[in-house]
Image: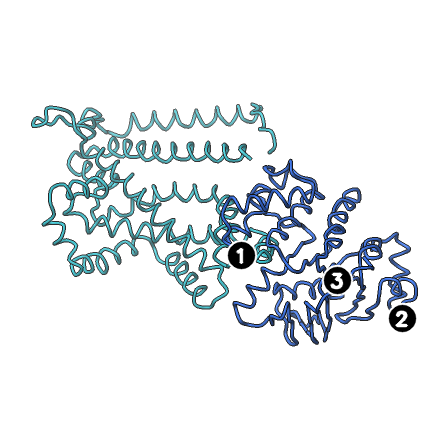
Amino acid sequence: MPAEKKLKFKLIDIVLLTLITAALVYIVYRIKVTIRYDWSWEIIPKYLFRFDKGKSRFVASTITLGFTMTIKLSIWGIILGTIIGLIMGILRVQSGLFARFAGRAYVELIRNIPPIVLVFIFYFFFSSQLLDHLGIEDAITTAGPGLKRFISIIFIEPKLLNEFFSAALSIALYEGAYITEIVRSGIESIPKGQWEAAHAIGLSRFSQFRHIILPQALKNVLPPLSGQFISTIKDSAIVSVISVPELSFQGMQVMASTYATFETWIVITLLYFMLTFSCSVIFGKLLRKMQTAD
Amino acid sequence: MHNKTLGETIIAVDSVSKTFDRNVKALQGVSLKVKQKEVVVIIGPSGSGKSTLLRCLNGLEETDSGAIVIDDTPLNEHHRNKLKIRTEVGMVFQNFNLFPHMTVRENIRTGPRFVRKASLEEADRTTEDLLARVGLTDKIESYPRQLSGGQQQRVAIARALAMNPLIMLFDEPTSALDPEMVGEVLEVMKNLAIEGMTMVVVTHEIGFAREVGDRIIFMDEGKIVEENSVENFFANPEKERTKLFLSKILENGGCE
């Protein structure tokens, strides 16, 4: 690995920084004198935490609930998307016509329709129909309080389960298409000699994948894969259109009831940024650790 | 190795042809028989089809026509036959092709464990024995990238031997090595020949061919041009094409 380059301040940097700062100061000044906007930051805290009189302690409120919902959706999206991507990525490199076609068709279909359409398709055509017919909703409404509580913790409160499943599945399918391509490129990056050596010692096709190709391929694609995981967090905002109470949806709710547009969206932005930035720092650290480990 | 008794025919190749895409004729009606314990050296200019022939013998390349029979098992479309032949024929590659994410130990025991379904202890015992044979006992926990080319190739030989093969194929095993490392690999191969392993070796190492080979096959343009005993091949080759080739490589000191 090349040694890290030392940061150096050059004249051009100083000039540019000065210009940008001046521009920003000017813009803020213009906003202050021209736009009439009554800042009311004091309304924000109660949407983060509110005092519950029954429990006599502070509990999470609208925005915080949305924040945890976004995390839950992202985790499910990442888990399911990775499973889908792994399977489809492996299908993409098979020699069989059907397997190859299935993988290709999936990727092309998903990548060529807007994600919002995917979310609606899932919500209206699949989940609302399918879950009813499978009787899952009935089963859950009659379930005991223990099971209901469990479902609330790992998914969502039972009455919104349809929305949650549609949301998580459409996120997973959407991200899965990109993960498929990442996995495929990882497999294709492994030199032919590795396949041949695995073949020559008699490993079955499955074992060749399992023990020789995939471990190397996945290690090679960890950087783009972690990028895709972070994208999943951001992309999850799209499911606000089917009323899943995640961060963006909750933001709209707060905005509608308070009219504190700027304050709300500044808070929402900061929360998303906190989440994705800390993930990218953590992933970056892990990757560096793995690289220095070998 | 001129005083050993050879066994029954173990490799039978009958008029095998193979054409690659764009009409490159790699093999044109090649026939060949190899007996147990025999060491056959294949030489020839690059592009002559010698590597392709070798790769056909363990099913790495499929043939277009002709028949290959290994240890009485025909190499055909039957999956079970293909698998049996792959496990009975070991192969060593020019570029070693060790698994970089595995230690030397894991590289060697992968075959026994996942193909032969040997227990971990058993596979480890095999691994340690083989590493002792190729003189790399102290490298057992190293990763391939920590080894020199010669060491890597010796590990690759041990990995192929771990499957306890009947036949070993060597595809230019010393061509990618620095000159000072060629000797250690050839030494391991020579010992293997002395122990009675059936070997088919594609190489440019004339010294090795002379010393270890029982028979030399000279190939050009996808055909076997000359097949001869080691003594005759170098002393009085039959074909003009062979003489021309020999004069060229001997001029260059044995390396093409």
Of residues A243 and A9, the one drawn nearer to the viewer in this rendering: A243
The three-letter code of the residue at mark 2 reads Glu
User: With B91 as the anchor, is A138 left or right in this view?
Assistant: left
The residue carrying mark 3 is B38
Which one is closest to the eye, mark 2 or mark 3?
A: 3
User: With B145 as the anchor, is A222 left or right in this view?
Assistant: left
Number of the label disc, if any, that sits on residue B238: 2
Dots 1 and 3 on the same chain? no
Q: Earlier in the sequence, mark 2 or mark 3?
A: 3
The residue carrying mark 1 is A203
Q: Residue under mark 3: which chain is it in?
A: B
- Number of marks present in the image shown: 3
Query: At x 89% / y 56%, what residue is drawn?
Result: B250
Between the residue at mark 1 and the residue at mark 3, the CA separation in whole angstroms equals 27 Å
Residue A249: give x, y in percent of width and height: 23, 42
Query: At x 40% / y 52%, what residue is drawn?
Result: A85
Quarter holding the N terminus of chain A? top right
Q: Secondary structure at mark 3?
A: loop
Between the residue at mark 2 and the residue at mark 1, the CA separation in whole angstroms equals 43 Å
Residue B38: give x, y in percent of width and height: 75, 62
**Residue A209 visible, this orientation:** yes
Please identify which colour was used for chain B in the image. Answer: blue
Between the residue at mark 2 and the residue at mark 3, the CA separation in whole angstroms equals 22 Å
Q: Residue under mark 1: which chain is it in?
A: A
B185 is higher (above) or lower (below) than B23: above
